[in-house]
Image: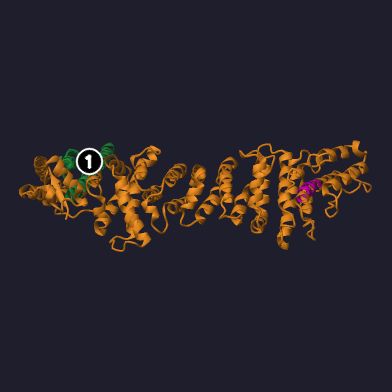
Chain colours: A green, B orange
Amino acid sequence: MALRSLAQVLQRLDVLDLQRHAGTDVWVGPSQQHWDDTLRSDRAALLRAGHELLVAARRLERRADDLDLAGLPASGRVR
Amino acid sequence: MTFLAYDPERLTMLEHRARLALDQLHRLHSDDPDAVDAMRTIRQVRLRVHEGLLPLVQRILRNDPLSEPIAERDDLSAVQNSLARFMAVERGWAVMVDPRPDDPQQVTVDEARALARRLREIPPAELADDPERLAWLTAELDRIGRDPVLAATFDAEFDAWAEWVQALAEPRARRMAGIDTRLHVSIDQLDATIDAFARVAHHTVTAGRGRSPALAALDDMPRYAAALFLRDLVLPPDLLGDVAARVITRPRDDLDELPGPNTNDTVLLMLLAEPLALPHFLVAIAPHLVQVAHDLADATLIETALLRGTDPALVDPTTAGRIIVPAMQWYLSDPEHSAGTFTADLVVPWTPQFAPANDDWDLASGARRDLIDRALQTPDALQRFVEQHEQIVANARRHFATGPARSVSEYTSYLALIGGLIVNARVRIVELRKAAWNTITDLGSLAASLVPGVALGAALTLGIMYVSQRGEPDPDATFANELRGADLAITMAAVNLADILQQKWVAQGLTTYATPDPPELRAFEEELPGTLFIRDFLDWVEGLPGGDMGEMGREAQRVIFSVINGTTVGEHVARYDP
């Protein structure tokens, strides 16, 4: 999967909403607290990964544009 | 053992959503070298859901929940399972043993709320002698008290402050008194739990400025319990002082009868650690000083509190008067007390307020004079007073230099007061006699900054230094009456002023070899020094260029007669004549 597409998928994953469905209106106790923390940090990690993919995609797109301007073939990796 | 409570339907929904999320994560794939980190994160999340969350949820749903009636399970009724118990009893949720142990570092809003509700149900005495459960409760309250949101949540649900603090304070009082050695918990442990309750209450008490349920509960607990709770509430100084006064002026109760530090000791020790609260407290308890002092196990605490609470750094003169006057009236009227170092220490910072012409305090000059006389009536008290002569002079200097429109007449009445208080016959120690007269000399030098027209320059400052080096005027200790002391003090101020005028004229080049020297102090003759000075002064003025109508003569009369003159000499001392 290309970088930009993967980034967009990461921002819409169902797992990002899982923390909302694992709150204290569903269960309470030490396990709930543990999974509340875990799912919150997983959500943050996935969103961060998606953001980094977008940054990488933009960087490659700018390089491709520069090569176009110079009359050289682009790598074609970014779609 | 900790428990897990759950809503089976919602947990089933969570299982379903976890499966969907997992399927989605399984489908993600990228070979792009720039996606390596992202794919690693995806794999880790997938693994956690696949091998952690989903199996746990499935196991919970597959297992039978506890089948026994919840309310009958002792382990579930433990305070640490408050939330699970509440959800089971109030919401009908299923309950099972949680495979994960409780994380003591973590408290949720729901847990804080459930704990508050549970503590309303549990008889406090059950925990008060159970070290293990009390330690757990203390740690939990401690964590709630560190988070304003958790504290507010707890506070909104909790209404048993009085019951809990009382249940903790009673065994503490018995332990302190050494009459109940069977208790399993230590005083430190009980203190820690009271402190933890107070930390939780602190947030809403300070936010509500005295209108929180926890603060209102102080009236429902024994005085001793209230004092312990208040000690840890960390209130703003004015509120702390007012509330502490409210507690300490309540009638005594059973706990106050136990030996050892009692309510009054506890309150005063707390306030001595928070000096800014002392003035508010002392003003409020002033009408009750007899009772407050009588009930103390350590009687010196009230004296220390009065001295610290009337420190000029903490209070303005008016507030000081509202404390010092009733304090002295109480102290000096008690036959068990005698004027000693305490009364001397109390008046030293505020001697200008005892001057007849001062009006900072709402008390007639005669009554003020009576108070300071009685405060210094014993040799010990007077000795203590004189020992602090540097502080007396420094406070007077500040008073007359910075006070609003201090008049020369207030100053001279003050000089007469101090001069009258310090007479040789009463200052028996030779070194102190010198200090006493130096005090008067130093106070006399203040005249230069009060009398209009006596400008200070470098040369004149030297003049003052010269004047203040005169030392004791009465090495033979012949002054034995108060009237002479008062007269002498004012005369010394006049002598100082005349010296300073002379210095000024010299600096201005106005003097010649024929200009006479200003009059000196004649302290050892039969007549009053003031009478002799006026006579010498008038002669001096006649000898100045132009006599009493010359420029120098007129300036000398205006300056000197502002502190002493022929018609009033002896007048301001006569009123102190015992």
Q: Is residue B487 visible to the viewer in this orientation of the structure?
A: yes
Amino acid carrying mark 1 in the image: Ala
**Residue B15's spot in the image, x, y percent?**
9, 44
Q: Residue at x 71, y 38 (%)?
A: B407
Residue under numbered circle 1: A74
Nearest the eye: B102 or B541: B541
The part of the chain drawn in magenta is: B485-494
Q: How many marks?
A: 1
- Is residue B548 in the magenta section? no
Is A17 left or right of B223, judged from the image as shown?
left
Q: Is A2 situated above or below B105?
A: above
Q: Chain of mark 1?
A: A
Nearest the eye: B62 or B97: B97
**Residue B13's spot in the image, x, y percent?**
10, 40
- Is residue B486 in the magenta section? yes
Is B3 left or right of B277, judged from the image as shown?
left
Nearest the eye: A66 or B269: B269
**Residue B10's spot in the image, x, y percent?**
11, 40
Nearest the eye: B521 or B515: B521
**Residue B325's spot in the image, x, y percent?**
59, 44
Q: Please, what secondary structure does the residue beneath circle 1 have?
A: loop
Q: Looking at this view, name the residue that lies furthest to the right.
A: B514
Graded by Cα atoms within 10 Å as few (under 14), some (14 to 19) or many (20 or more), the crowding at tag 1 reads: some
Q: Is residue B96 visible to the viewer in this orientation of the structure?
A: no
Task: Please identify the dominant SS of the magenta region.
Answer: helix
Is B491 left or right of B355, judged from the image as shown?
right
